[in-house]
Image: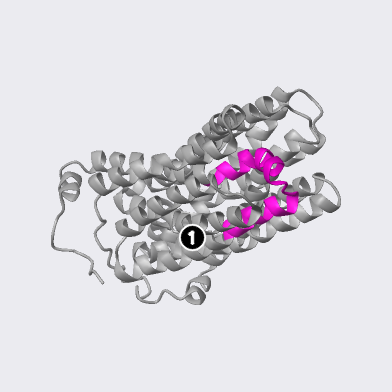
Amino acid sequence: MAEPVNSEVSPPLVAAAQSPRGYELRVLLLLGLAFGFAYFDRMAMTFLAPFVMEDLALNNTQIGSLGAALSVTWALGAYFVGRWSDSIGRRKPFLLAALVIFSFCSILSGLAWSFGTLFATRVIMGAAEGPFLPICLAIMVAASAESRRGLNAGVVQNVFGSILGTALAPIILVWIAEHFGWREAFYMAGVPGLILALLIWRFIAEPAHAAPAASEAAPGDLSPWTMLRQRNVLLCSLISCCAVGSAVIGSIFMPLYLDGPRGFAPTTWSWMMAVVGLCPAVGGVMVTALSDRIGRKPPMVFFGALMALGPLALLYHDGSAVTLTAFMFLGWMGMGIFPLFMGVVPAETLGRARAATAMGLVVALGELTGGVFGPVIAGSLADSYSLDVPMWIQAGLALASGAIALGLRETNPRLTAGKAKQEVPA
């Protein structure tokens, strides 16, 4: 097993030392594109679901199960591979392996001939994609100036993820599915990740191994129980359960709701979802930049609850597609809280030496609960009653995430440092 290198300086690290801001921007661009296309691959099943359902004769429960299967292995990969990464102090090899594996899994999804074969490809894809975000954010935190830590995490996770995974994906994938077939759409989705693996291998350095600060627990203590005794990590995990559940249910069932009960044509609802897909990018910049200024907690409370607006608009707004899209857009800006509870707050609570494990734990718990049980339960209830039920569940989980955030302790270094100075006796 390779030991972390502290004394040798690789070419990218030399560049970083000479131009820290330039290297930070390079990392931001490449990691952002990589996560964007990872999310593109994950969301492909969502936007291609109406075509796959018809061709393979699947029901709502099976579609929900595909999302749940990916969430299970996403969760396990996020925690265990993140912990492995922290234990040996290496990030880059795990990132490259994940890129290659999930890209091939997207191609294999296009070769599926039954529910079982498609299920298997989504299981493997989840295992590869799960650790991708925690490791991306751990590398980004290490490369970021403290004043831009929240913003950079938001850009990597939300801006690129939104533009590629939820804005461009429905337009591109639905167009390919309509003109060539859904299988060809899956084939195309897997190519960019392979290209980005080469670019990251060449242009991003392995981050220097971070020694824990004196105030931090020993870096070897990576037990989930120890981490969950930290109030912020526990609350971020609970927020993750609710917010991930809300987002996964929405991403799976909103296109089906637009296509079914609302009766929009595929061309119309794909453009509606594309516009809505841009709002996490707006929220990712606005919410995280706001958190760098006023603290992490207030934006998480407000924007977490705001996510309920989208499904409520689908249920009750009878206006035009334009006004409905506007309401959905505003609601999904709440996705800007994801980089905060998944990355920034856990890392600021436990420190860089345990960042990947802490992030992986929060992601894992969210995926194992909201990501796994949410779509299965919602799909089953939709088959038994109507597609209205998933919209109600989505809204309720969003409101719960905002309520839980009320209990967080502030971690913004600028605010906590100022408070500490005020408490020092004269």
SS at mark 1 in the image: helix
Which quadrant of the structure image shows residue 84?
A: bottom left
Residue type marked 1: Ala
Give the answer, above or below, for where 257 lies relative to 93.
Answer: above
Q: Is residue 366 visible?
A: no
| Residue displayed at 62% across by 59% down | 241
In the rendering, at what x and y percent does residue 262 appear?
Answer: 79, 32
In the image: residue 273, left or right of residue 37: right
| Residue displayed at 51% across by 76% down | 225
Principal secondary structure, stretch drawn in magenta: helix
Q: Is residue 253 visible?
A: yes
Q: Which residue is mark 1?
A: 127
Which quadrant of the structure image shows residue 98?
A: bottom left
In the rendering, at what x and y percent does residue 200 appear?
Answer: 29, 46
Q: In the orientation shown, which residue stands out farthest toward the right?
A: 385
**Magenta includes 64?**
yes
Give the answer, above or below, for where 369 lies relative to 32.
Answer: below
In the image: residue 192, left or right of residue 88: right
Q: In the orientation shown, which residue stands out farthest toward the front?
A: 113
| Residue displayed at 66% across by 25% down | 267
Q: Nearer the viewer, residue 123 or 245?
A: 123
In the rendering, at what x and y percent does residue 184 appear?
Answer: 52, 36
**Magenta includes 66?**
yes
Q: Nearer the viewer, residue 250 or 295?
A: 250
Report the span colored magenta.
42-71
Q: Which quarter of the image is occupied by the N terminus?
A: bottom left
| CA neighbours of label 1 inside 10 A, class few (<14), some (14 to 19), many (20+) | many
Q: Which quarter of the image is occupied by the C terminus?
A: bottom left
